[in-house]
Amino acid sequence: MQSTQGQATHKKNSMFDQPIAVWAVAFASIIAFMGLGLVDPILPMMKDKLGASDSQLTLLFTSYNAVMAVAMLITGLISSKLGVKKMLLTGIVIIAVFSGLAGCVNDVMAIVWLRAGWGLGNAFFVATALSAIVSMSHVGVAKSIILFEVAVGLGISVGPLLGGELGAISWRGPFFGVAGLMVIAFALIFFMMPKASTVATAASSKRKASILDPFRALKHRSLLTFGIAAMLYNFGFFTLLVYAALVLGHLHHVDVHGLGYVFLGWGLLLAITSVFTAPVLQRRQGTIKAMCVQLLLFAATLFVMGYWTTDKTTVIAMVILAGAFLGNNNTLITTAVMNAAPVERPTASAAYSFLRFIGGALAPYYAVKFAEWFDFHAPFYIGGGFVVLAVIVIALSHKHLKHVDQVEGH
């Protein structure tokens, strides 16, 4: 018994002590999440080249996130039939096909529809990747989630940089770039992830999965609270990601390379804090308190951008700084969700992601509408307001969330 405990302790020493299959999924996750910010630097260019309006450009994110939100509801059902490995590979193929097709068309609304297909592939991949990493990992749930968030952060940070560099050649470049990278991701999963792995054990219990499982899971107050909070803070997140890029491109004339570097800085801070500072904050403040503090700090960056929208330096500095608060919060809330309710982790992830991506679908479109209805400062103020509302939702349900801190402390 002592020997077994010693081995377990050794395995939990480092987040990086992982089987090769986990590294394959993590690296493929980096590539998959590049798609989130890849089109960010080329938004002003697409407006000029395709004659697109700002509202049409925001639909590139709305269609992507809306399909992801709905598709999350069926990922458990499909995964139980395909198996984890085939589910990941199917998602990768869908992403590659639709991103490649998006680079071939000349109409922005056609790209909007193709981005919807891209979102379907991302839903298949993302919902499965997190549970796969957690199931195959040797280091426990918390550190596995941090590893996944690192992959997310790196993908989000490298995406705008790659989009900026390829976009400087042609606005089509980023779309073709994703398609090519997904071929690499496919090879990694196909050759490095065993067909029969520890994930099969987790998947086998989902043989009788139902499309209603995520809705049943939301009956748990803790999971519902985190889902609603994520929907609200994602409104601020995508206001930053999309509207800030439009402001920097149109109002401050930051070119495609510049936008790539700005959001690279944002994404790098997001990735670094996900790993190094989020666990420290969690230990010192507790998951719920730390989460609320980080959300309020993120809201503050949006309010500052709202007040100093015409100051390029301030907007750039706040975009980059926001990455730190988002990185901390992403790790904290994802860890909390995995321990929020007595349901299987893929089901909890699907339910939470359904609500989260609804916020991501609404924010880009309405951010531009708020600018049209009020003024160009308004989207930042309103986005910050939604983030503050997320904190209020968490605070009002605090008694239903105490067990999350207890689990993490244990």
Image (cartoon, rainbow, N blue to C red):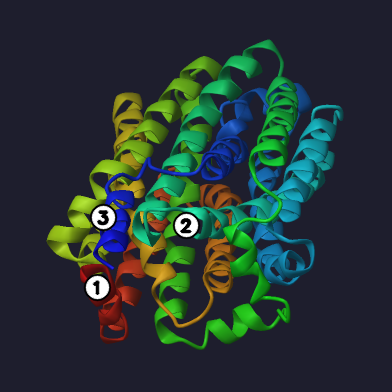
Q: Could you tell me residue 213's position as x and y percent?
A: 64, 81
Do residues under tags 1 and 2 come within 8 Å of each other at their CB atoms? no
Mark 1 vs mark 2, foreground winner is 1
Q: Residues within 10 Å of mark 3 (few under 14, many from 20)?
A: many
* Residue drawn at (20%, 69%) of the image: 409
Question: In the displayed structure, would residue 98 be above or below residue 384?
Answer: above
Do residues under tags 3 and 2 come within 8 Å of each other at their CB atoms? no
Q: Could you tell me residue 336's position as x and y percent?
A: 36, 68
Q: Determine whether, in the image, residue 305 is placed left or right of residue 120.
A: left
Quadrant of the drawing holding the C terminus: bottom left
* Residue drawn at (81%, 31%) of the image: 100
Q: Secondary structure at mark 2?
A: helix
Quadrant of the drawing holding the N terminus: bottom left
**154 vs 253, nearest the viewer:** 154
The residue most toward the top is 169
Q: In this figure, which residue is indicated by the disc labeled 1? A: 405
Which residue type carries mark 3?
Gln
Q: In this figure, which residue is indicated by the disc labeled 2? A: 234
Q: Residues within 10 Å of mark 1 (few under 14, many from 20)?
A: some
- Distance, label 3 to label 2, CA atoms, is 14 Å
Q: Quadrant of residue 289?
A: bottom left
**40 vs 15, nearest the viewer:** 15
- Distance, label 3 to label 1, CA atoms, is 16 Å
> Which comes before the other along the chain, label 3 or label 2?
2
Q: In this figure, which residue is indicated by the disc labeled 3? A: 294
Whether residue 380 appears in this view of the structure is: yes
Q: Could you tell me residue 347's position as x and y percent?
A: 58, 73
**115 vs 81, nearest the viewer:** 81
Do residues under tags 3 and 1 come within 8 Å of each other at their CB atoms? no
Which residue type carries mark 1?
Asp
Question: In the displayed structure, would residue 337 be above or below residue 263?
Answer: below
